[in-house]
Amino acid sequence: AYSSGGGALSPGYYSKSCPKLEPIVREEVARKKNETVVTIPAVLRLFFHDCFVNGCDASVLIASAKEDAEKNTRDNDSLAGDGYDTVNRVKARVEKECPGVVSCSDILALAARDVVSLADGPYWTVELGRRDALVSRASDVEGKLPGPDMKVRELTAIFKNGGLSQLDMVALSGAHTVGFSHCTRFTDRLYNFSGTGKTDPSFSKDYAEALKKACPRDVSDTIAVNMDPITPITFDNNYYTNLLHGFGLFTSDQVLYTDSASRETVKQFSANQTSFFEAFMASMIKLGRVGVKTGDSGEIRTDCTAFNH
Ligand code: HEM
Ligand SMILES: [Ca+2]
Ligand SMILES: [Ca+2]
């Protein structure tokens, strides 16, 4: 379990030491997004995978010659390269403006906020003052990240490790309103649900048919589909409306509606985008506090992909 106090974080942390930080991050993220829209889901997911393994400390960004860092794991293998590129580009500019001052973990937290708002989602104030990790071990990832086959009880337990509630879990799952998934992450639901050789009955029939066309039985592990088939690049509440219609891609998505423990929240977020946006912002701020290192812990990396020493 991690602390999620976040007491030492504050929005104005760099107001004297790097006053242009936020406009620089915004500009670089927007430039990258205009080159490829994949930037949006890539950065958002990268932030989540960082925070859930040893806290929001940029541990996921470390590149290891021995390939034994967090990024060298099955769970993190599918993190799109554009997420890392975005952070590295922002960092390069920020280092020119204010050398040695701004952590990679704070850049990632700001970039995650900016991609959401650039996709027409909400905009919130980001707490700052995180320091970067001194370790990144592949062996630390196991069991920390949720899997697409999990049910509500397991999902809630994983989020609880970071001090996040079931409501936070349902709100943050709304991130699947943008981005892609490889077919291999859900083909069991299409062709061999619970070992039955059948299709998961909680799928809409039409949606399952469409997914079978995009993802045939022996599909290559490079093929991916939109997670929100209706508004794939817009950050909206359509993820929840999809669940009402059996358009959830993973078991971990669809169970949020089929399980009565979370169904009312799904209905509410589907009916009212403002209530989803408010919950999402609050949960992102909580996510950004998970296991943060402040004060004398950690370091301010100069290169986000490597420790300073
Ligand atoms: C609730 C439990 C969650 C599970 C089981 C889960 C699982 C997954 C899986 C399996 C993928 C597809 C990866 C692939 O291509 O193989 C994915 C994609 C994604 N996830 Fe999640 N996720 C969860 C929560 C979250 C949260 C909390 C966020 C962010 C706040 C998030 C953001 C994303 C995004 C944006 C993508 C698309 C990535 C891209 O297009 O590059 N997920 N997730
Ligand atoms: Ca981390
Ligand atoms: Ca959407």
Image: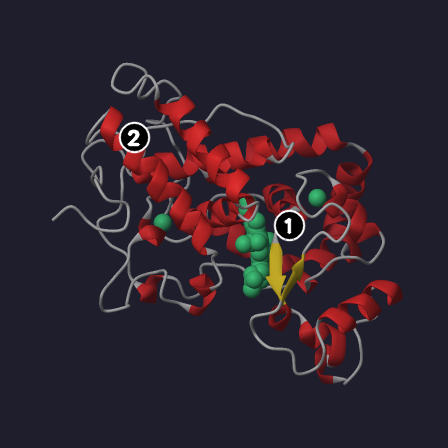
At horizontal 44% and vertical 61% (from top left) the residue drawn is 76
Q: Is residue 297 above or below residue 215?
A: above
Q: Is residue 302 left or right of residue 238?
A: left
Q: Please name whichever residue, 109 or 166, is drawn nearer the observer in this view of the structure.
A: 109
Q: Which mark is residue 176?
A: 1
Q: Residue 103, image x and y in percent? A: 28, 35
Residue ID for mark 2: 94
Picture quarter containing residue 231?
top right
Depth check, mark 1 against mark 2: the one in front is 2
Instruction: Please state which of residues 107 and 298 is positioned toward the viewer in this rendering.
Output: 107
Whether residue 60 is visible, yes or no, is yes
Q: Amino acid at mark 1?
A: His
Q: In the image, what residue occupies the spot 73% across and 69% down? A: 214
Instruction: Answer whether residue 1 is visible to the viewer in this image.
Output: no
Query: Spatial distance from mark 1 to mark 2, Cα to Cα?
Result: 30 Å
- Residue 20 versus residue 246 in the image, above or below: above
Label 1 crowd bin: few (<14), some (14–19), many (20+), radius 10 Å: many
Where disc 2 sits, the SS reads helix
Please, what secondary structure does the residue beneath circle 1 have?
A: helix
In the displayed structure image, the side of residue 230 where residue 114 appears, left or right: left
- In the picture, residue 190 is in which quadrant? bottom right
Q: Which mark is residue 271?
A: none
Query: Which residue is pictured at 64% across the width and 50% down the height?
Result: 176
Mark 1 CB in 8 Å range of ligand 1? Answer: yes
Most distant residue in the right direction: 205
The mark that comes first in sequence, 1 or 2, is: 2
Q: In the rendered view, tell whether residue 98 sits above or below residue 233.
A: above
Amino acid carrying mark 2 in the image: Val
